[in-house]
Image (cartoon, rainbow, N blue to C red):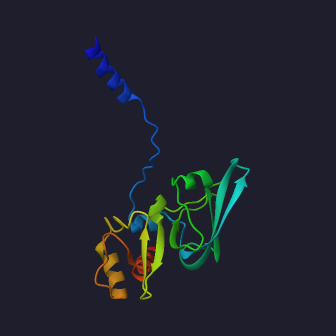
Amino acid sequence: MKSILIPVVVCLVLLVPVNARAVRVRHLNLADMTSSAKYVFAGECVGKETVFDANIGRDIYVYTFRVDRVVKGNPGGSHEVRVIKSLADQNQISNFEKGEKLVLFLYGESRLGFSSPVGLGQGRFRVKTFDNGRQKIVNDIQNRGLFRGMETAVRERALSSTGDAAIPDEGPMDYETFMALTEDLVNR
C-alpha cells in the first residue's frame, strides 16, 4: 500500500496549480514598437509622486517627464505617466526614477488615464552618457531582438546617416543611431 501511496501523493502535489506571477509579453522589434506607440520621446523623469486614485481605490505613481525630443505624437513639453503603485513596486510594470534619462515608446492613456511603455520594459530605453560624451541606449532586455525581422534597408539608411560601422544585435547602441532609425520608421 505504501509503495502505491507515495507516487500518488507526488502526482497530486505536481498537479496543484502554482501561483505564478510571471508576466509573459510578446517580443517586439523596433518597427513593432514604433507603430504601436502613441508617443515616442526622449526626456528625463523630473517627478515621481504617490497619490490615491479614487476611481480605482488604490495608490498610484504619477511620473512627470520633461520632453526634450519628440519623435512621435504630441506629448507636450511635459508628459505624465500614471501607473498602479503596487504593480510597479512588484516590477510587473515599468517603474521610473527621478533623474533618469530615457527614450520612451508609450501606449496612449487608458480610459482611466493609465499608460505604460510598449511591450513593458521593451519600450523603455535608458540613456547613458560616457566619459567621452557619447550617449548609448539600452532597454530592459538589453536590446535583444530589437531588429529581428526588420528589413535591412532601414538599418542601412541609419548607418549611412551616422557613419557607424554596425548596429549591434544586442546590448547598448549609439543614441543618435537609434533615434535616426526610429525617426525613419515614424516618417515612412
User: What residue is rendered at 58% in x and 62% in y?
Assistant: 108
As rendered, which of 166 and 99 lies closer to the eye?
99
Quadrant the N terminus occupies: top left
Report x, y in % for residue 183.
45, 78
Work out whether residue 132 or residue 171 is closer to the camera in this orientation and state it: 132
Residue 82's spot in the image, x, y percent?
A: 63, 60
Residue lying at the far left in this picture: please name it: 3
Identify the image quadrant of residue 51.
bottom right
Nearer to me, 26 or 44: 44
* Residue 179 shown left or right of residue 14 in the figure: right
Image coordinates for residue 28, horizontal then vertical, percent:
40, 61
As drawn, which residue projects farthest toward the front?
A: 2
Give the image location of residue 35, x and y in percent: 46, 66
Q: Residue furthest top?
A: 1
Q: Is residue 112 visible?
A: no
What quarter of the picture does the C terminus occupy? Answer: bottom left
Q: Residue at x 33, y 83 (%)?
A: 159
Q: Is residue 14 left or right of residue 107?
A: left
Question: Which residue sits at x=61%, y=60%?
Answer: 109
